[in-house]
């Protein structure tokens, strides 16, 4: 297939280097995504009204999906309800772990099929938004169905993941060039 590297040309070392570069890229991209979301949230703070939080299971409905996932995992696997302080740690841990895993897969895929890096990582970010935010997160019960969310929340999620994808590709490319 055009665009795929020949198996004879692709070494295990290339895949490991791609994976390593992608892991680093995913962590940095997760940080960039958080920074983007913080900036956007600060812009909209004045115009939003505060809704009371409704508790469901071990999390508040307004908690990010990563915090909800951490709380549910803790309760179902360890039979432990997270304290507010533990949620402050666990939510970002899930976010960065997910980002690292996605980045690692992206980095490995870039070694095998370099065309996945086309578009400076923007298609990768859009795919992550579509699969995670519009598919997996609602299917796991960590958010309502996508059609119940306002268009602005979809644009916010897409913008956040475009930042993730763009940053992931820039960092992956830079990190990969440093690896022999």
Image (cartoon, grey):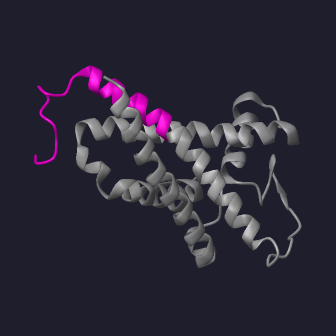
User: From the viewer's perspective, is 15 left or right of 82?
Assistant: left
Q: What residue appears at the point 42 percent right and 28 percent down from the top-left corner?
A: 20
* Residue 155 point in image, percent of width and height: 56, 71
- The residue range painted magenta reads 1-25
* Residue 91 point in image, percent of width and height: 71, 43
Image quarter of residue 22: top left
Q: Is residue 83 in view?
A: no
Q: What residue appears at the point 56 percent right and 60 percent down from the top-left corner?
A: 160
Is 15 covered by the magenta stretch? yes
Q: Is residue 111 in view?
A: yes
Give above or below for 133 relative to 70.
below
* Residue 94 point in image, percent of width and height: 64, 39
Give above or below for 40 relative to 6.
below
Q: What residue appears at the point 55 percent right and 41 percent down from the top-left corner?
A: 28
Q: What residue appears at the point 24 percent right and 44 percent down from the top-left corner?
A: 114
User: From the viewer's perspective, is 57 left or right of 13?
Assistant: right
Give above or below for 128 relative to 102.
below
Q: Nearer the viewer, residue 174 or 165?
A: 174
* Residue 2 point in image, percent of width and height: 11, 48
Q: Nearer the viewer, residue 27 or 171?
A: 171
Q: Nearer the viewer, residue 72 or 15?
A: 15
């Amino acid at each position: 297939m055009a665009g795929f590297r020949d198996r004879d040309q692709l070494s295990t070392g290339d895949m490991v280097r791609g994976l390593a570069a992608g892991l680093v890229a995913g962590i940095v991209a997760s940080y960039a995504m958080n920074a983007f979301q913080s900036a956007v949230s600060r812009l909209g703070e004045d115009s939003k009204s505060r809704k009371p939080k409704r508790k469901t299971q071990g999390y508040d409905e307004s908690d990010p999906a990563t915090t909800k996932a951490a709380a549910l995992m803790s309760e179902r696997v360890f039979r432990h309800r997270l304290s507010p302080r533990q949620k402050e740690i666990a939510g970002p841990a899930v976010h960065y772990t997910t980002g690292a895993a996605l980045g690692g897969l992206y980095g490995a895929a870039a070694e095998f099929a370099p065309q996945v890096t086309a578009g400076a990582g923007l298609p990768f970010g859009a795919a992550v938004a579509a699969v995670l935010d519009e598919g997996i997160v609602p299917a796991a019960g960590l958010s309502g169905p996508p059609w119940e969310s306002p268009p602005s929340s979809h644009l916010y999620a897409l913008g956040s993941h475009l930042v993730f994808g763009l940053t992931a590709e820039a960092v992956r490319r830079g990190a990969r060039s440093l690896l022999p």
